[in-house]
């Protein structure tokens, strides 16, 4: 019998194995405290902390002209060289630097993300007044919304309809009390 069907919180198996009756865990807590009163407490390792985004990434990469800035190219190239070195050390068997691979990869991703965001911002500015823009720069929305008429197209009226509206306008009247 599984413990998933019980809705009262955590459950544990009681001493009766033949019936498989489940007992709510809160009823077993006093007994558990007595059993484990003199035992050594379990110490779990602290969760891994990740270094914050360094100021160099913020200030160097978020400059307006990314393509003109050679510091960004170096900033991007250095972690990739260190990642290659870490991967070769992993293959050779020295396991001291294995934990750094994750951090280096995330650092590279961070730099590339900012570079790509800047490039997209530049492209958006370039295509701002143009009639057409690349598909990935257009607003995503839903398929139905994209197929909808524009406000201008929806407001257009045929010549015949225009004449009807002019010659037969909506009558304005009120009931006299």
Image (cartoon, rainbow, N blue to C red):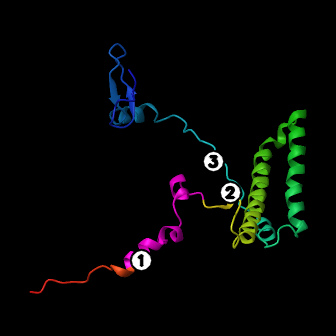
Residue 94, placed above or below residue 135? above
Query: Badge 1, how many Cα within 10 Å: few under 14, some, many 20+?
Result: few
The quadrant in which the C terminus is found is bottom left
Give 72 or 134, whichever is nearer the viewer. 134
Going by the image, does 34 lie left or right of 50?
Answer: left
Residue 81, percent across and down?
Answer: 90, 50
Main secondary structure found in the magenta portion: helix
Q: CA distance from mark 3 to mark 2?
A: 46 Å
Q: Residue at x 59, y 41 (%)?
A: 43
Secondary structure at numbered mark 1? helix
Name of the residue lying farthest toward the bottom: 176
Q: Which mark is residue 163?
A: 1
Image depth: mark 1 or mark 3 in front? 1
The quadrant in which the N terminus is found is top left
Which quarter of the picture shows residue 7?
top left
Q: Which mark is residue 139?
A: none
For marks 1 and 3, the one nearer the N-term is 3
Q: Which mark is residue 46?
A: 3
Q: Which mark is residue 135?
A: 2
Q: Residue at x 52, y 63 (%)?
A: 149
Residue 79, placed above or below residue 9? below
Residue stretch in magenta: 140-165
Q: Residue at x 36, y 81 (%)?
A: 167
Query: Badge 3, how many Cα within 10 Å: few under 14, some, many 20+?
Result: few
Residue 42, percent across and down?
Answer: 56, 38
């Amino acid at each position: 019998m599984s413990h998933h069907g019980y809705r009262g919180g955590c459950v544990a198996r009681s001493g009766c194995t033949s019936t498989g009756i489940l007992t709510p865990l809160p009823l077993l807590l006093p007994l558990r405290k007595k059993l484990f009163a003199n035992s050594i407490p379990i110490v779990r390792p602290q969760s891994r902390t990740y270094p914050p985004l360094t100021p160099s990434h913020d200030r160097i990469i978020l400059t307006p002209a990314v393509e003109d800035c050679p510091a960004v190219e170096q900033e991007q190239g250095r972690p990739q060289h260190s990642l290659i070195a870490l991967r070769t050390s992993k293959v050779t068997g020295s396991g001291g630097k294995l934990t750094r691979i994750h951090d280096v990869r995330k650092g590279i991703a961070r730099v590339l993300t900012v570079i790509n965001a800047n490039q997209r911002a530049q492209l958006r500015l370039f295509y701002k007044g143009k009639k057409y823009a690349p598909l990935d720069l257009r607003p995503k929305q839903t398929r139905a919304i994209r197929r909808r008429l524009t406000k201008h197209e929806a407001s257009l009226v045929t010549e015949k309809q225009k004449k009807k509206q002019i010659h037969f306008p909506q009558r304005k009247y009120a009931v006299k009390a």
